[in-house]
Amino acid sequence: MTHDARTLKEIESFAVELARGGGARVQSALATEVTVRHKTAALGEKPARDPVSNVDRETETWLRERIASRYPSHGVIGEEFDDASTDSDFVWCLDPIDGTTNFVHAFPMFACSIGVLHRGQPVAGAVWCSTSHELRPGVYHARDGGGLRFEDHSLRRRPPVEGVVCRLTGEPGGAIDCDLPRDRRATGSAAIECALVAAGSMRWAMFGRVHIWDVAGGLALARASGLECWTRGERGWTAFSSFSAPAGRGLRDWRQPLLLASVEDAELLRNVAPV
Ligand code: IPD
C-alpha cells in the first residue's frame, strides 16, 4: 500500500481526533477513582515502578476500537496490550498515557501519544499534551511533508531568546557528560519532551532506551519542525531512518536511545552517550 498526500492528510486528522479524544478521557478520569498496578511487580522488582492504571488500559482499548473500525487493515502497537499483528504497511503506535506516574499523582504533565508508521517510517504523529507552550492542553501534530501544527494551527519552532545562555534541554535519564551550557529538565513524559523540543521550548532531548510508543508520535513532530533524529547502537549515534524489529523479535520490542536536536546541536552531541 502506498501513501499519497490525501491519505496521509486523512490519517493525520484522524490521529488528531484520537489524541484529542484520548486526552479528554484521561483528563476527565482525574476526577475518578483510579486503580493502579505495577508492571515490574510481576518481575519481583522492588520498589515496584512503572505503574499502569485502569485509565491507561481503557483509553488504549477505546483507541484500538476506533482504529479497527476506520482502518481495519492497519496494524497497532500499544503500550498496554501485546498485539502480534503488526505486519501491515501502516502501523499505529499508541501510548494512551505517557507519563502514567505523573497522571496517577495528578502531576500535570502527561500525554496521549499517537504515532503512525508506514513501513517503519514515522509519517504522522499527534500528541495530546496536558499542557503546552500555550499553557493549555492541546494536540501537537504533523505529517510527512506538512509542517508542525498545534491545535490545527501552523507552529513555527520558537527561536532562542536573545541573551539567554542556558537553554532548556531534555535529559530525562540524568545529566549527560557534556560541557554545553544548559538547564536540564525531566518532565516524566518522553512524548511531552519530544513535543516541546519540536515547538522550541526545549533545545534538544536525549533519551536512554525509550519504547517505540513513547516516541513514535514525537518523532513525526520533531521531523516536521526540521530537527535531526539520531539513534544509538554499538557504533554510536546514527541518523534515524525507520523503526525496525530487533533480530528475532517484533517491532514492539524496538527500544533504543534517541536524540532530537538541530543540525548544529546534533553535531556537538554525537560524541555523547545518554545516561
Ligand atoms: C514513561 C515516560 C517517561 C520515560 C519512561 C517511560 P509511560 O512512559 O515517557 O518519561 O522516562 O521511560 O516509560 O510508562 O508513562 O507511558
Image (cartoon, rainbow, N blue to C red):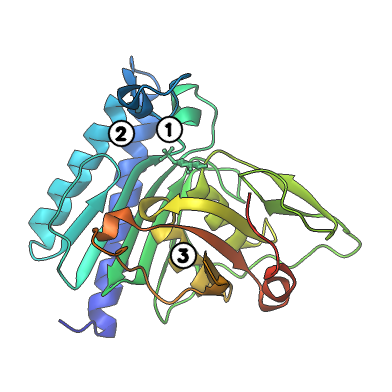
> Which SS class for mark 1?
helix
In percent of the image, x 32 and y 21: which residue is there?
Answer: 37
Residue 95 versus residue 90 in the image, above or below:
above
Asked if disc 1 is less than 8 Å from ligand 1, the answer is yes
Q: Are marks 2 and 1 in contact (CB under 8 Å)?
A: yes
Disc 3 to disc 1, how far (Cα)? 20 Å
Residue 258 versus residue 213 in the image, above or below:
below
Amino acid type indicated by mark 1: Thr
User: According to the image, label 3 marks what residue?
Assistant: 219
User: Where, by quadrant of the figure, is residue 121 drawn?
Assistant: bottom left
In percent of the image, x 72 and y 71: which residue is there?
Answer: 265
Amino acid type indicated by mark 3: Leu
| Classed neighbour count for the residue bearing mark 2: other residues with Cα under 10 Å, few (<14), some (14–19), many (≥20) | many
Across and down, in percent, residue 23 comes to 37, 41
Q: Are marks 3 and 1 in contact (CB under 8 Å)?
A: no
User: According to the image, label 2 marks what residue?
Assistant: 56
Using residue 152 as the reference point, say whether residue 206 is left or right of it. Answer: right
